[in-house]
Amino acid sequence: MIKRTIVIDTDPGQDDAVAMLLALASPGELEVAAITAVAGNVPLERTFDNARRLVELAGRPEVPVYAGAPRPMFRDLITAEYVHGDTGIDGAVLPEPVVPALDDDAVDVIIDLLRERPPGTVTLCPLGPLTNVAQVMVRAPDVVDRIQEIVLMGGAFYEGGNTTPVAEFNILVDPHAADIVMRSGAPVVMMPLDVTHRALVLPRHLERFAAMGTPVGDAVHGMLDFYQRYDVEKYGIAGVPLHDPCVIAYLLEPSLFSGRHCNVTIETGSPITMGMTVVDWWGMTDREPNCFYMRDVDSDGFFDLLADRIGRL
Ligand code: RIB
Ligand code: CA
């Protein structure tokens, strides 16, 4: 497997945290060139601080973390403390960051990285609202063609929304940014709720993290134990869907996932369906396919990969 260079754009968030740890536990396959924080689950100052704490928890303090957009492009910020807790990573109390905060702007960092690295060698992994990625495309249209792939968590269609009846959180927070990304022509792999709701971490899985007896295992167990409460109560399911780790698992073992290349268009006009990802799964329109839309995952294989890698930290 050729080592991939990735940027993780994130709004930690317990599931973002597990995705980051999965990536940072896989240095043989992934070069994490930068982690960029965006406002989403909780405000930017918290997502930035959480990301800095997580790279140190992973024993990877050399991975640079940068702060990006504090709010969506046009809409007011909506956050999700009701799901993630006030810190965004409730369930774990991580040490204060030791590495001083970097003050470079995340969007500029991504633009510079795309210009410095050979074309087609940097993959962007957005795990939150797409504000930073859209700003990259607006500020520097020349770099769009240099993006190897955008593998993002967001969207929903057959599963319905998790924040409105039709909209998934990441897309709803900044639908205009999502529209820019989906119209950009960059190669996109979308991990929507249709697939992430099948990547359920069950109680028996949770206990494997607790049994690791490591600071990382304990933190993951605590975060997911807290995080599951909302989904278990809302959906009545016996597990917590691990949305964001699906992005990293796809990079490590793409055969775990299946989907179809089709058109996904973002609703940015209607107040009723704002942020909806309209998926032309059956090719019923003349809209060009613009992403690989995932709908299924081998959940046992997904979890085995996750537990194996987290167990390495
Ligand atoms: O809808 C799920 C997504 O919204 C995940 O990325 C979660 O972290 C939140 O950002
Ligand atoms: Ca997220």
Image (cartoon, rainbow, N blue to C red):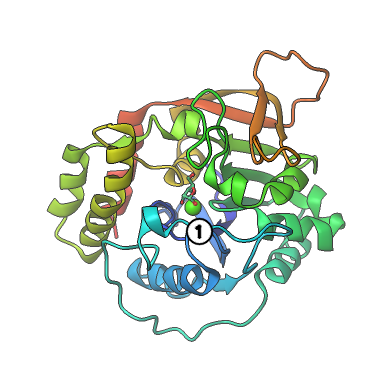
Q: What residue is shown at x 23% (from left), y 58% (from top)? A: 222
Q: Position of residue 87 (x, y in %)?
A: 38, 68
Q: What residue is shown at x 50% (from left), y 71% (from top)? A: 48
Query: Which residue sits furthest right?
Result: 142
Quarter of the image that includes the C terminus: bottom left
Secondary element under disc 1, as helix, strand or loop, is loop
| Residue 299 visible, this angle | yes
What's the residue type where badge 1 is placed?
A: Thr
| Residue 120 visible, this angle | no
Q: Position of residue 91 (x, y in %)?
A: 26, 61
The residue wearing badge 1 is 79
Q: Position of residue 201 (x, y in %)?
A: 28, 39
Closer to the camera in the image, 150 or 282:
282
Crowding around mark 1 (Cα neighbors within 10 Å: few <14, some 14 to 19, many 20+) is some
Q: What residue is shown at x 66% (from left), y 52% (from top)? A: 174
Q: Position of residue 250 (x, y in %)?
A: 49, 38
Closer to the camera in the image, 79 or 218:
79
Res. 206 image quadrant: top left
Closer to the camera in the image, 76 or 189:
76
In the visual, does 19 lie left or right of 191? left
Asked if 29 appears above or below 99 in the picture, the reply is: above
Q: What residue is shown at x 23% (from left), y 51% (from top)? A: 225
Query: Which residue sits furthest front?
Result: 271
Asked if 12 appears above or below 178 in the picture, the reply is: below
Asked if 274 appears above or below 42 in the picture, the reply is: above
